[in-house]
Amino acid sequence: MSTFLVTIKDVILSRREEVYKEVMKLLNEFENASLPMVSLDRVKLDFGEVRYDQRVTLPITITNTGQVVAQFRLVPKLDENTLCKQWMTVTPTYGMLIPGEQTEIEFTIGIDNLTSNALNTNKEVLEDVLILRLENGRDYYISVSGSYARSCFGMSVEELVLYSDPIRNVPLDPILRAEKYDFNAKAAMCVPKELWRIVDAIYERGLDERDLFSTPGSPDEVYQIRECLDTGASFENFSVHSMTEVLISFLSNLSTPIVSASLFPTLDIDAQNIQAFARKFLEDMPPIQYNVFIYIVSFFREVLLHRQRNKLSPAKIARICCSCLVSSSQGSPDESKGNMQQLMLHFLETNSI
């Protein structure tokens, strides 16, 4: 008879489950501790009312709340090549934070001519979603919104002559506009009311001011004058130099120039053919542009009557006309632009219109 001592391992299922859970918990904690983690103080940016040629900036604070270095960057949305829409800029677009460190990302909206025209024609809205991505981490979605305070700057003269109300009161929605306004050509004004208001104000404030159209205006007054034009408010006692700066800005920033590239003289202008060129130039202009051109040239002729005091010359006024009535982005040769200046000088010095 023999006796054996045998040791047998017995698995206690309940205890095994407890150990398994403890190990998995430790692994999860280790894995989570090794992942980057950040917090954003907000993910929605409401810029409110944004005005033409105004830059509005809102920041988002990003804080590294994890235990490892966090690298972040803004990435384009699916099937897109840009981080955001053209009216927005972001600084910085990428960065790195050590644990506990924080930084600000600045989101800026700016309305230029291109954006203003897109907003006025309902091809664009001030809404976007940006993606902030953590390397080896999650994505954060930042929503951006704002409303456009409509402005006469960046619009076309063809549309401006249709409205007797201040442009700020004209709805952006085309259906609401059609219900409110009669777009019959007979109801249209000859020139935009905004242009008439600026020119009239310059008349009142004096054409004898020295260095007219050369001395810059006050930036604060320029902003207030634009607001008066957009809202219909009365002008305050603004400087005539601020008024002239707004006039040049208004004409230079129309969505389409008064003088298109097709009207540029194709041949050299001389004393023998300038009269024929001038006649053809006026005949080829569309009606609204023709009215505005005649109105502006007549105004500058009046300005030149005071040249002894304001020290302006016809050549200088001709250069001003070319800079604000002819788009500088049209890429025309210098020779054509020189011909245009001769043509403008001819209109200013003769009674050919």
Image (cartoon, helix red, strand yellow):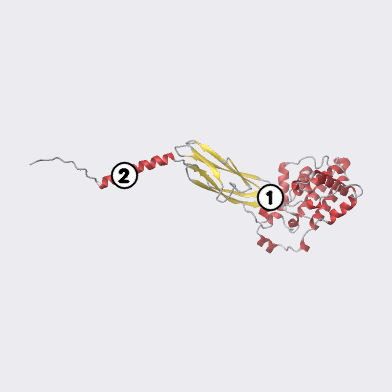
Classify residue 14 as left or right of residue 324. Answer: left
- Which residue in the structure is indicated by mark 2? 20
Classify residue 126 as left or right of residue 332. Answer: left
Q: Amino acid at mark 2?
A: Tyr
Mark yes or no: residue 261 visible: yes
- At mark 2, the secondary structure is helix
What number is the disc on residue 114?
1
- At mark 1, the secondary structure is helix
Q: Residue 58: x and y, percent?
A: 59, 44
CA–CA distance in space, label 2 to label 1: 63 Å
Question: Residue at the left extreme?
Answer: 1
Q: Quadrant of the N terminus?
A: top left
- For marks 2 and 1 on the same chain, the one whose residue lies earlier in the sequence: 2
- Say whether marks 2 and 1 touch (CB < 8 Å): no
Q: Does 279 sit above or below residue 18?
A: below
State the residue at coordinates (68%, 55%): 120
Foreground of the two, 91 or 223 = 91
Mark 1, other Cα within 10 Å: few <14 / some 14–19 / many ≥20: some
Mark 2 vs mark 1, foreground winner is: 2
Q: Residue 226: x and y, percent?
A: 72, 48
Q: Amino acid at mark 1?
A: Leu
